[in-house]
Amino acid sequence: MATYASTNPAELSDVVTRVEPVPAEEFAGAARRAKRAQRAWARLPAPVRGQVVANIGRLVEANAEAPARVVTREIGKPLVEARGEAQEVVDTCAFFSGEGRRLYGRTVPSEMPDEHLFTFREPVGGTVVVTAGDFPVAVPSWSIVPSLLCGNSVVWKPAEYAAASAQAFHDCREARRRAAGRVPDVFADGEETFRGLELALEQRVSGSGTAGRRCTSLGTVVVHEDVHDEFVRRFAEAVATAVVGDPFHEGVLYGPLLDEKFAVGFEEHLGRIGDHHVTHGSTGSGRITNANPRTGFRGDPERGRTAADPAGLPLVPNPIRLSATPPTYRLPPPRLGDDASG
């Protein structure tokens, strides 16, 4: 299969890493290997697995700046948000490390004298986690960390356009000797991934999980008529002064789109804006270039993949804005009746 080049969306000539997506058969092979490794991992007492999870968190915390900068370079998130992603992994490990002492079973009354009935938890076995790239390390940790704690092995299929970010998280996990080999990373395109899942399930890999998308971007603002005009004025002012540009620049709120396919979808979305719409918040529409500038842009717009959104930017930093959900808002008139939320 063709090699995929993951590039810096703010500097398209900067190739962050290259990966070779594998066919479905190799994906299934990784699942089989993880399944074999799972047995020894499950034999470790749960509190010991909790300590391994805690150690992974400490490793990420001690080296957090490195994966954060990889996320910014590869995904285009402002550095402050990328640092937040690394901290999310640390917090997830801290939370689940204690769960190793709380994997409780149950005792059950018996109708027979001198008999005691009880249940205890068993690992699922082999699990598969498939994630998108807009949260390349934080969201995967929500599935990988608890799965490991419970005694499972994990095959992780990260997004190919977040390959270097995934590798940074992988390196921290593999540094813990006891966890090494329990979470192989596999790069494949969507079709091959799901073919591989089918093969793996046929070969008795016993669980699968999918994580990644979290569509919580603001889409519609419903404002009371008494404050509608003032809200629009303040909102337009805030988004017009929001700093757009190279995510490594301090103070940048909105960076480049992480992959070309998202840029194309973003432009299609902007193309739906008609003459009858009133837009606020930007000096241009479409890709930001020297010929189509945005006031206050940080960096060189010709080197990256940044879109100017005439309908505004978030008032609060929101990493979802870098995904296929553009940061455009519908602000209906103050009197639309009871169905305004539709």
Image (cartoon, helix red, strand yellow):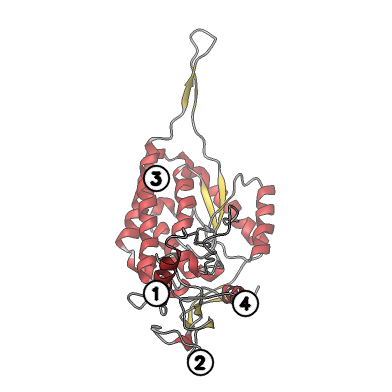
Q: CA distance from mark 1 to mark 3?
A: 43 Å
* Earlier residue among tags 1 and 3: 3
Q: CA distance from mark 2 to mark 1?
A: 23 Å
How many other residues sit within 10 Å of disc 2, few (<14), some (14-19) or many (≥20)?
A: few
Check disc 1 and report the residue beneath it: 237
Q: Secondary structure at mark 1?
A: helix
Question: Where is residue 79 shown, x and y percent of the image?
Answer: 37, 71
Check disc 4 and report the residue beneath it: 274
The three-letter amino acid code for the residue at tag 1 is Glu
Q: Are marks 2 and 1 in contact (CB under 8 Å)?
A: no
The three-letter amino acid code for the residue at tag 4 is Gly
Q: CA distance from mark 1 to mark 4?
A: 22 Å
Above or below residue 179? Residue 335 is below
* Earlier residue among tags 1 and 4: 1
Q: CA distance from mark 2 to mark 4?
A: 22 Å
The three-letter amino acid code for the residue at tag 3 is Phe
The three-letter amino acid code for the residue at tag 2 is Ala
How many other residues sit within 10 Å of disc 3, few (<14), some (14-19) or many (≥20)?
A: many
Above or below residue 201? Residue 321 is below
**Front-most of 275 and 333?**
333
Q: Secondary structure at mark 3?
A: helix
Mark carried by residue 99: none
Q: Quadrant of residue 129?
A: bottom right
Check disc 2 and report the residue beneath it: 291
| Residue drawn at point x = 47 percent, y = 56 percent | 139
* Earlier residue among tags 3 and 4: 3
**Label 2 vs label 3, nearer the camera:** 2
